[in-house]
């Protein structure tokens, strides 16, 4: 904020980032990237994980100082040294995850966000002003309701309203719809789109959903590995063309065709109940049967008990009630049972849930088998050579990018950590596979490979339970679809016959 | 000088990174494990020097007498090694649970209970051949101390009680039990000034390593430390423990029996400290009394942290700390410092070692360039 002055106080303005380069040590996160967001436009920023989208946006918001490059706000060069400068210029950001205080009301959250909260808040006056403000806005939110009581869609609206309340007129949205149902996403983005058309707002949205880009954005900028891969008008592009620009020449694993019919019941849940960390019931007496050679998908907005259900199956959480049977036997997630029934688990965030970051790739790959020959001699002495040989073979087979088998697994990228877990869990025979958001945050190549492996396991006769927040993933892979809401299964259908509107309605609890 | 060295290293690293990481990068972690505790120790000595200078003593004299009192002569070496023996064992009481991510600081309690059980075993078997008595004492010490720390592990696993707090509080309970028995049920009527149990008998003492004044406890310690290292790094059990300690969620997802691991490791840890208590009885005191609460259990915590919980590194660190405590007497005689001033040094070292934890992975020229 040394050069130039604040842009005019009303109406939308554009932001240009010119020749942005960002270096973290030896790593080049952004290489001479250009981004031009026209005033009063809805601009989408596309790219795989690690393509540099977040880095670019953080440079604009003043969280990072770009190594080289300039930022123009409303056509004037601005030195944005910190987020405060960005806010003063009218730039605002909405994050993927909520930043509201759950125990406070919507009104309190809005007032709290201001820089100049008075020591004693004159609530009658503030409420009157807030109501006047809301009257001008396209969204309606209940001002007096506690944030913990309102739905995810309403919370996301609050986040956006907060930015508008703070008079930000250039909004950066970081994957804003990842926690919303398709209907909620359409509603929120549609309203924002209206404000953009009226010339009140400019929007830059980070996303990986082509559907949203096609429906709402005017322009698109695509990054690939820190470089500008393409930019243009959405009306002149197809999703295929954008996808090709995003992933470049990389070859994706081809997913095998769905073959074979479902066989006998393999995994049965009967009135399974589990509590969350606070001791409230998160999984409410759910029953489900997954048969051999079948993928059952569990859909739902995050936080409806899916995580707790998977944790019970993975042995990471106590089961409060009900019964789980695998191939007819009672199951309590012990090592012996997992082994006998050839169970595999692909959890979300594999580094947090399935790996020890400080141990080597080879060690992590051996977690399931280390206590048996050839890894252990006589059942107790570790045979280091066997660890390395097995790891080398699996690293090649599963295309894990690592310098050596002895590299700590925490040094690998997210996609490669999940590939290592994939090698461990699917390297042998699989009869029951439980996967939870296995592709969350991974790049295209890794996603294609994981989807192909899951489908292949199904075709070989495994019973697959796939829990995902990504409806597209579930529609692509599952044979049957179940919707989970408030800890209960509220809808079930064959995927081929599922109606997306009905699924979305159940996800939202209607 | 230092900058120059760092610069040239960095240049070498950059060139080498084309073909593979340079020497400093490849061994960065190992070098850090030596460099950082070493620097913390040096820093603590400097601060202790300032402390001593405030008493009007020359810090250089201090460093000389400390060296002389610890490692200067064969006599001081023997004194040092004798003190190092129980420290190796009590350090294992902290280092083994640390592999599971647990912080156990109650080695002193396990030592006392171990001493008490070993003494009881010896007194119950009076008249048996010495070897039988000695083996019974080892078993008594290990089992007594092992169960004591296992209690902490069980409280944590089944009742959610923090193991650090419970193990510390158990020290005071152990001390109370010891005093109660020594002054009551097990009291030797002949011990008037210092209530003690009866002597275990000269024949049942384990004696010294031939040609030295160092008792066999040192060998016990060395064997225990090496066995602990092999257990942790080369066996299936140790692998499971490291998985559990590294990430308990990962351990559960592959179905490892976490409770069993915690109880077993706690038993072994307490067993090591209990063995230290047995050694103190069978090689030094010959009986159990309040003298046993000499702080070996607490110094063991310091040894384990300074050795970064590595069972092999515990051996040299215990010898170093044994040396520091051995030099206390000389400091008193030659410099007129209070005997307890080495405890001040120990405290300063502990603070430095804990603070130096923040440096790991932050030393520029040791970083890998992946």
Image: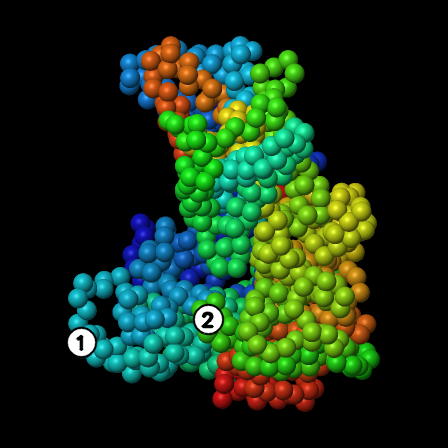
Mark 2: secondary structure: loop
Sequence-wise first label, 1 or 2: 1
In the rendered structure, the answer to whether residue B279 lies left or right of residue B236 reads left
x%, y% of residue A460?
81, 72
The residue positioned 36% from the left and 75% from the top of the image is A147
- Give me the C-alpha separation between circle 1 and circle 2: 39 Å
Q: Which mark is residue A125?
A: 1
Q: Position of residue A364 (x, y in %)?
A: 68, 52
Q: Which mark is residue A386?
A: none
Q: Nearer the viewer, mark 1 or mark 2?
A: 2
Image location of residue A422, percent across then percent down: 71, 60
At label 2, counting other C-alpha atoms closer than 10 Å, the crowd grade (few under 14, some 14-19, many 20 or more) is few
Instruction: Classify mark 1: helix, strand or loop.
Output: helix
**Viewer-proximal residue among A451 and A426:** A426
Nearest the eye: B252 or A16:
B252
Q: Are there few (<14), some (14-19), or many (20+) residues within 10 Å of tag 1?
A: few
Residue topped by disc 2: A279
- In this picture, residue B43 sits left or right of residue A333: left
- Which residue does the image show at 27% across and 69% down from the upper left? A111
Q: Chain of mark 2?
A: A
Task: Write down the quadrant of residue A104 in the picture.
Answer: bottom left
State the image coordinates of residue B158 (x, y, percent, origin top left): 52, 59
Q: Is residue A196 left or right of residue A254?
A: left
């Amino acid at each position: 904020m040394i050069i130039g002055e604040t842009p005019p106080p009303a109406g939308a303005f554009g932001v240009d980032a010119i020749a942005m380069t960002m270096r973290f040590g030896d790593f080049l996160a952004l290489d001479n990237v250009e981004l031009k967001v026209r005033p009063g436009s809805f601009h989408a920023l596309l790219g795989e994980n690690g393509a540099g989208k977040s880095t670019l946006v953080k440079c604009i918001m003043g969280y990072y100082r770009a190594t080289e490059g300039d930022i123009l706000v409303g056509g004037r060069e601005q030195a944005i040294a910190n987020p405060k400068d960005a806010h003063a210029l009218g730039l605002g950001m909405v994050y993927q995850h909520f930043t509201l205080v759950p125990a406070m009301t919507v009104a309190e959250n809005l007032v709290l966000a201001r820089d100049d909260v008075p020591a004693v808040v004159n609530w009658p006056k503030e409420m009157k002003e807030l109501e006047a403000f809301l009257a001008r806005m396209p969204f309606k939110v209940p001002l007096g309701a506690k944030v913990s009581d309102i739905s995810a869609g309403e919370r996301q609206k609050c986040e956006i309203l907060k930015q508008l309340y703070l008079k930000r007129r250039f909004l950066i949205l970081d994957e804003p719809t990842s926690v919303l149902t398709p209907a909620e996403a359409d509603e929120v983005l549609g309203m924002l789109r209206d404000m953009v058309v009226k010339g009140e707002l400019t929007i830059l949205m980070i996303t990986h959903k082509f559907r949203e880009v096609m429906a709402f954005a005017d322009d698109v900028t695509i990054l690939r590995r820190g470089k500008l891969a393409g930019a243009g008008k959405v009306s002149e592009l197809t999703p295929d063309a954008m996808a090709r620009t995003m992933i470049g020449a990389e070859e994706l694993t081809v997913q095998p065709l769905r073959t074979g019919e479902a066989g006998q019941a393999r995994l049965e849940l009967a009135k399974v109940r589990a509590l969350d960390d606070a001791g409230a019931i998160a999984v409410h007496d759910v029953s489900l049967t997954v048969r051999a050679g079948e993928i059952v998908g569990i859909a739902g907005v995050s936080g409806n008990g899916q995580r707790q259900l998977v944790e019970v199956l993975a042995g990471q959480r106590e089961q409060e009630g009900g019964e789980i049977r695998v191939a007819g036997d009672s199951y309590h997630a012990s090592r012996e049972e997992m082994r006998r029934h050839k169970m595999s688990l692909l959890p979300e965030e594999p580094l947090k849930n399935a790996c020890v970051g400080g141990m080597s790739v080879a060690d992590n790959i051996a977690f399931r088998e280390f206590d048996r020959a050839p890894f252990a001699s006589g059942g107790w002495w570790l045979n280091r050579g066997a660890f390395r040989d097995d790891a080398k073979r699996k690293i090649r087979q599963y295309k894990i990018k690592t310098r050596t088998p002895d590299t700590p697994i925490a040094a690998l990228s997210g996609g490669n950590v999940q590939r290592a877990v994939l090698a461990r869990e699917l390297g042998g025979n699989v009869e029951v596979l439980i996967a939870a958001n296995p592709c969350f945050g991974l790049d295209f190549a890794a996603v294609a490979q994981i989807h192909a492996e899951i489908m292949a396991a199904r075709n070989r006769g495994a019973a697959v339970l796939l829990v995902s927040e990504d409806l597209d993933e579930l529609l692509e892979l599952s044979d049957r679809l179940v919707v989970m809401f408030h800890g209960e299964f509220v809808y079930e259908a064959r995927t081929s016959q599922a109606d997306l509107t009905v699924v979305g309605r159940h996800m939202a609890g209607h | 000088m230092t900058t120059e060295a760092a610069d040239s290293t960095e240049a070498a690293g950059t060139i080498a990174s084309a073909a593979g990481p340079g020497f400093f990068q490849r061994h960065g972690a190992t070098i850090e494990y030596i460099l950082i505790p070493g620097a913390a120790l040096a820093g603590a000595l400097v601060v202790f020097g300032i402390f001593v200078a405030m008493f009007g003593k020359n810090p250089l004299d201090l460093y000389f007498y400390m060296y002389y009192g610890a490692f200067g002569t064969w006599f001081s070496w023997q004194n040092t090694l004798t003190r190092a023996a129980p420290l190796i064992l009590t350090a294992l009481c902290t280092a083994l649970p640390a592999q599971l991510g647990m912080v156990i600081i109650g080695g002193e309690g396990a030592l006392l209970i171990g001493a008490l059980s070993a003494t009881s075993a010896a007194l119950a078997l009076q008249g048996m051949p010495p070897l039988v008595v000695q083996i019974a004492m080892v078993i008594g010490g290990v089992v007594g101390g092992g169960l004591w720390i296992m209690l902490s592990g069980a409280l944590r696993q089944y009742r959610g009680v923090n193991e650090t707090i419970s193990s510390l509080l158990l020290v005071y309970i152990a001390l109370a039990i010891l005093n109660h028995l020594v002054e009551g049920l097990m009291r030797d009527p002949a011990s008037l000034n210092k209530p003690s149990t009866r002597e275990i008998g000269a024949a049942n003492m384990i004696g010294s390593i031939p040609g030295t004044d160092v008792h066999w406890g040192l060998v016990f310690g060395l064997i225990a430390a090496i066995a602990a290292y092999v257990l942790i790094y080369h066996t299936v059990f140790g692998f499971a423990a490291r998985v559990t300690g590294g990430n308990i969620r990962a351990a559960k997802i592959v179905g490892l029996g976490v409770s069993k691991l915690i109880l077993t490791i706690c038993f072994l840890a307490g067993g090591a400290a209990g063995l230290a208590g047995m050694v103190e009885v069978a090689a030094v005191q010959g009986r159990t009394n309040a003298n046993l609460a000499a702080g070996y259990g607490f110094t063991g915590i310091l040894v384990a942290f300074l050795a970064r919980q590595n069972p092999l590194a515990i051996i040299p660190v215990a010898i170093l700390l044994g040396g520091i405590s051995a030099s206390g007497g000389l400091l008193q005689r030659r410099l007129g410092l209070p005997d307890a001033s080495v405890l001040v040094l120990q405290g300063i070292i502990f603070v430095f070692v804990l603070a130096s934890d923040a440096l790991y992975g932050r030393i520029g020229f040791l970083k890998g360039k992946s």
